[in-house]
Image (cartoon, coloured by chain):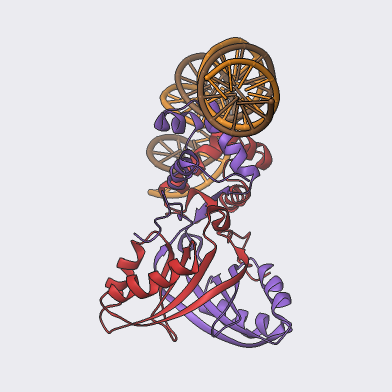
Chain colours: A red, B purple, C orange, D brown
DNA sequence: TCCTTTTTTTACGAAATTCGAAAAAATCTT
DNA sequence: AAGATTTTTTCGAATTTCGTAAAAAAAGGA
């Protein structure tokens, strides 16, 4: 897989704003032909550089409760636990981390009740979880996949 | 804003898989006309129920280091800190939480060096941050916006 | 229930976009 | 520099999207 060039990154930046921008429009903005945009996007998709998706607003879907849960797993059980959690659709993020918690997950629920049920019934049934540290989201300030930057300048 | 019906949810489910699925194709799958899909999607977008975006693979963009950072803020400074952090493109998630940390953020970096620089130079310069607890991501198991489910059944 | 009003869906021609494939241009190799 | 390879452009055909009007369905009122 070749390194992305400036045109690739510009395509991604445009699509970050609106994932349905027509190839012709992107082509016009970047001053190249539609065919170029098309073949580039085809290549990027094939290389797994990105996917076309939608970003739903959890609130609008009735998912009023979000939580980040730090988990401690029993030695050797981490992978199994992570994979089992990944299968749950309420769980949108699962990662293994260094630090206080072996696994950190992020999940959405319709209500506090549903969250409690998740922690008490669902997590407790998963073999290998030793402890769960729940943080309830009070307010969301930012949530995006928009981490395509121009250069190597990530920090501005 | 009216509650979403089954057709709306099915549209979202299809677009979750591929955000570029043509209206004609969705219409065919759901057994309704293209016009119906079009007017529904227009309404959903206007109501802010979802957006068309792309999901880039951070690894493929050279962002090999991801971290979740729990922050403790000084009383009354939380909002300012959150808003300042939200402006940084490396930061993809910012939320206020109950629990050990006032704010939890998620960010992507090209290298450990960039992460260290972020914590030491960038965070320290933000007025109101009392402490930062960095967890380094070792492995990612799941990361998606795909939390549209059929019914109220979120936990399977 | 019947009629009216409102909303949603369908239909369909026109405009725009996407697609396939071949030619042209650019890049790479030796 | 010549040949090979990759990328870009071009262009007509197929498909999709769009605007809009009519039909159908749903909702509301008496």
Query: For the view shown, which residue lies furthest in the bottom direction?
Result: B130
**Residue B10 sits in quarter:** top left
**At 69% from the left edge and 79% from the top edge, which residue is drawn?**
B78
Residue D19 locus on image (x, y percent):
69, 23
The front one of C6 and A80 is: C6
Question: Residue B117: in sight, yes or no?
Answer: yes
Residue D14 locus on image (x, y percent):
45, 19
Residue A78 locus on image (x, y percent):
30, 77
The front one of A25 and A101 is: A101
Seen in the picture, residue A76 relative to B46 is either above or below; the reply is: below
**At 57% from the left edge and 50% from the top edge, which residue is drawn?**
A12
Question: Residue B139: in sight, yes or no?
Answer: no
Q: Is residue B110 left or right of residue A81?
A: right
Seen in the picture, residue C23 relative to B23 is either above or below; the reply is: above
Q: Is residue D20 left or right of residue A127?
A: right
The front one of B140 and B73 is: B73
**At 44% from the left edge and 45% from the top edge, which residue is drawn?**
B13
**Residue B138 sits in quarter:** bottom left
Q: Is residue B16 left or right of residue A77?
A: right
The front one of B150 and B91 is: B150
Residue A126 locus on image (x, y percent):
28, 73
For the C terminus of chain B, give its image quadrant.
bottom left
Q: How many marks?
A: 0
Seen in the picture, residue A137 relative to B148 is either above or below; the reply is: below
């Amino acid at each position: 897989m070749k390194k992305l060039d400036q045109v690739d990154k510009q395509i991604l930046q445009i699509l970050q704003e609106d994932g349905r921008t027509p190839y012709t429009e992107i082509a016009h903005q970047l001053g190249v032909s539609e065919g170029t945009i098309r073949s580039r996007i085809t290549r990027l998709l094939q290389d797994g550089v990105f996917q076309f998706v939608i970003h739903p607003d959890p609130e609008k879907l009735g998912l009023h409760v979000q939580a980040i849960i730090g988990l401690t797993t029993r030695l050797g059980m981490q992978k199994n636990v992570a994979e089992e959690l990944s299968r749950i659709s309420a769980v949108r993020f699962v990662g293994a981390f260094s630090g206080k918690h072996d696994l950190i997950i992020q999940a959405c629920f319709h209500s506090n009740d549903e969250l409690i049920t998740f922690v008490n019934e669902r997590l407790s049934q998963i073999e290998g979880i030793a402890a769960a540290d729940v943080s309830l989201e009070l307010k969301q300030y930012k949530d995006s996949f928009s981490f395509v930057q121009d250069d190597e300048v990530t920090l501005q």
